[in-house]
Image (tube, grey):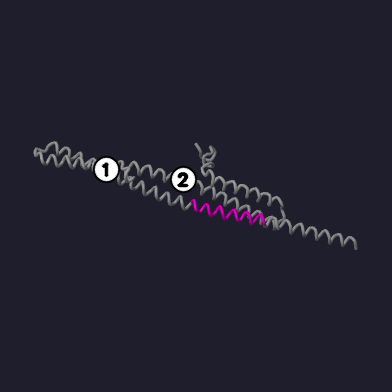
Amino acid sequence: MPEAHEAAHEAAEQSEHLEGSNKKIALLIAVLALCLAFSETLGKSSQTNAISQNVEASNLWAFFQAKTIRATQLRTAADAMAVDAAAANDPTAKAAREKQIDTWKKAAERYDSDPSTGEGRKELSERAKHAEEQRDFSFAKYHNFELASAAFQVAIVLASATIITGITVLAWLSGLLGIGGLAFMAIGILSPELIHALPFIGGH
């Protein structure tokens, strides 16, 4: 019965080989799942920051608009009173009007720029633009982490399919997608706007 013995031995070797291969695939899936958890966490954090910065920018622009309206109203009132002051015959009334005109003009100037409080139109505009830049930066990070998560998810599916089908090519594809996911994560951390800057994606 040497043939039967040899067949049993080969079957045992194949079983051991399969078991060892499945352990490697299981390890690959575990690593991919860990990477997916990181990318999902980083993506959620970036998305939250982007939404918060977008709200801040909107609030600052609304404040800027309110200051613009108020400054315009004061200048209009000052111009109207200047006409009345020029026509006034009473020196006391004329002086009072000129004083009010001066007060309004100074207030309008403070609405335009007020470095002491940082709430002049000039300062608000700078702060709003900075908030928009931060928002765009956070959204760029979020998009990279989303791409990384998608790559990891597909890689996990392919690795799982390898265990069922025994097709080794799927494992290699899974590994390549995992590397791609890591690349997107690295870009999201180090240079989030790199992909958007590429000419074929939307750069200038």
Q: Secondary structure at mark 1?
A: helix
Residue neighbourhood size for the residue with mark 2, other residues' Cα within 10 Å, grouped as few (<14), some (14–19), many (≥20): some
- State the image coordinates of residue 12 (x, y, percent, origin top left): 80, 61
Q: Which residue is mark 1?
A: 71
Q: Which residue is tagged 2?
A: 136
Q: What residue sits 51% from the left and 38% below the top?
A: 203
| Dot label at residue 149 | none
Mark 1 residue type: Ala
Residue 112 in the image, given as x and y percentages of width and height: 30, 41
User: Which comes before the other along the chain, label 2 or label 1?
Assistant: 1
Q: Amino acid at mark 2?
A: Asp
Residue at the outermost left position: 90
Quarter of the rendering containing residue 125: top left
User: Image quadrant for the N terminus?
Assistant: bottom right
Q: Residue at x 68, y 49 (%)?
A: 172
Q: Is residue 172 magenta?
A: no
Q: Position of residue 108 (x, y in %)?
A: 26, 42
Q: Mostly what secondary structure, the magenta segment?
A: helix
Q: Viewer-proximal residue, 147 or 132?
A: 132
Residue 154 lies left or right of residue 19; in this view the side is left
**Could you tell me how far apart the alpha carbons at marks 2 and 1 are, in whole angstroms?**
30 Å
Magenta residues span 27-46
Between 32 and 200, the one lying in front of the other is 32
